[in-house]
Amino acid sequence: MKSQKKSKMIVDGTIYTFLTIGLVFVLLPFIWMLSTSLKQLNETFTTRIKFIPDKIMWSNYLEVWRLLPFGRFFLNSSIVSVTVTVLQLFLCSMAAFAFSRLKWPGRDSVFLLYLAAMMIPGQVILIPNFLMIKLLGGIDTYWGVIVPQLFSVFGTFLLRQFFLTIPAELEEAAIIDGCGYFKIYRSIILPLSKPGLAALGVFAFMFSWNNFLWPLVVLNKEFMFTLPIGILSFQGQFSTNWPLMMAGACQAMLPILIIYAVGQRYFMEGISLTGFANA
Amino acid sequence: MLSKKKALLIAACFLAPHFIGFLIFLLLPVLETFAISLLDWNMITQPKFVGFKNYVYMLTNDIFFRKAMINTVYYTAGSVIIITVTSLVIALMLNHVKKYSTFFRTMYFVPNVSSLVAVALIWGWMYNSDFGLINNILRVIGISDPPGWLTDIRWSMPAVILMSSWTQIGFFTVIFLAGLQNIPRHVYEAAEIDGGRKFRIFFNITLPLLRPTTFFVLIMVVINSFQVFEQSYVLTKGGPAFSTTTAVMYIYYKAFRDQEMGYASALSWGLFLCIFIVTLAQITVQKRWFYYEGRD
């Protein structure tokens, strides 16, 4: 018994050691980003490994805002991501309600079409969507970036899975009381689905905040850039000014890291809800 | 109960806003891309119908497309191996220790949620051949002449693969972990009573029972990898010497730099078919594997 306990301790110890080494690999780029972002420029031109800067340059963080319309990028990203999130929650929950709580002929075939559409790679619909948005005058506008991101199949699927877990008795009682379906959706299903809505909210916001290819295609003017496109223009403007580039990258990343820290429980729930996890 | 007609009407009211957008921005564009792929069109002159000429050119004459496809397959192969093996190993470790496993899982996931562009900027700096962190570390451990990661055609693709895998491993660890937790405890208990050794239990029980999850991960990684774009777009702009230009990046350049909308659409459809066939092949292999399994 004793030797068994001992060997378990050795195994566990080894595993924790490896997990910690893994953690270092995961965090090292972030730490390096933070470290570089606080250095003076000439401190980066060295082959010595140094994590703590001689002089902490908080001013780098402000400098980025001065040199680039960084505030504008933030504003653009916020407008786009918040709108996409709110409207996705609305549109997807309505559709999910029709797919889960209503019985109608043809429901399952339409849903199958939705599931199949999840397999469509983004690049195959890029060109027609660009041409359409261009035709409608949506280049360099908020709505041009936002609208094609609204009709998430994944979001509908996620919420449908969640709505299916709500027992039917509640709405049956409501129907007998003479409730309309919109009232059932609004006053019963939505309030009971807060964790599901939160999961989709976190997903939608992150996808939209980090979305790159579509904004890259529809946004040409700098004052309309979202953050990913905006910080990409660092490369051109700062070329080898690594401290400024890292200060910018750090600030662009911060909102999403905060949201992840707060909402990671919903995030993991969303992953298991969509059956990703038990495929 | 509601009449069929009324039920349909109510459902339509709820579904319509989403469904109309779904049709316009997702379903129809797949067909539109195909229609455009039959045109010769540069957005300036009148589009001209050319039939399958774009496809013929793509398959027979376009050496850049061929190179981009080879790069994409290289990237996919590398990613599949690194991501699947690493995330499986991490998931096994997390599943074993239980304590603090949520903490590690949460931390390992962080690269996945971070903006890919920001991440690529960081790695671009770490890969810097003169002053980057990676080469500085390599010099410390005695490699006096470390490679120019993003400037040497032999190392550029491995560099892209490494960075990209770093962002994805956390996600697939979570998936593997959930798969492991779905294996019922009593299966292990029975094996332990039978005196099965640890590594035999792993190969004879854990791995076979984990097969559905593994296949799911493989399919996801392959689909994602075939569509790789941002990673090399930010890190290397496709260079040096075309060595990291991927299929989607080539499509992007053809469409939005060269304005060859017809040809770019044909490329999109070609890639779409490619992904479709590879996925189908994977599913077929999986089914056959299960079938033989069942007959034993």
Image (cartoon, coloured by chain):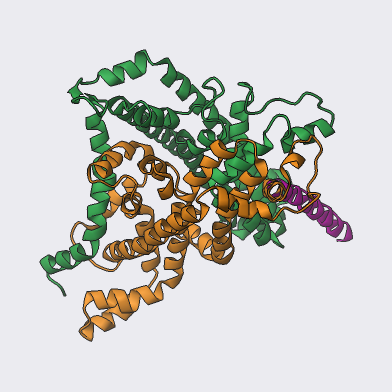
Chain colours: A orange, B green
Residue at x-position 34% and y-position 46%: A140
**Does residue B65 sit above or below B24 in this rendering?**
above
Q: Is residue A2 magenta?
A: yes
B233 vs B278, nearest the viewer: B233
B285 vs B216, nearest the viewer: B216
B170 vs B204, nearest the viewer: B170
Residue A274 seen: no
Q: Is residue A120 left or right of residue A56?
A: left
Residue at x-position 64% and y-position 42%: B86
Q: Is residue B123 left or right of residue A172?
A: right
Q: Is residue B164 magenta?
A: no
Residue B95: image x %, image y %? 66, 55
Q: Kindly give the residue lying farthest to the front in the view shown.
A: A66
**Residue B37 placement: quadrant:** top left
> Dominant secondary structure of the magenta stretch?
helix
Residue B132 seen: yes
Residue A209: image x %, image y %? 47, 53
Residue at x-position 24% and y-position 60%: B17
Residue B191: image x %, image y %? 67, 52
Q: Which residues are magenta?
A: A1-27
Residue B151: image x %, image y %? 63, 24
Looking at the rendered image, the quarter that the N terminus of chain B falls into is: bottom left
**Residue A245 placement: quadrant:** top right
Q: Kindly give the residue lying farthest to the bottom in the view shown.
A: A177
**Does residue A277 sit above or below B117 in this rendering?**
below
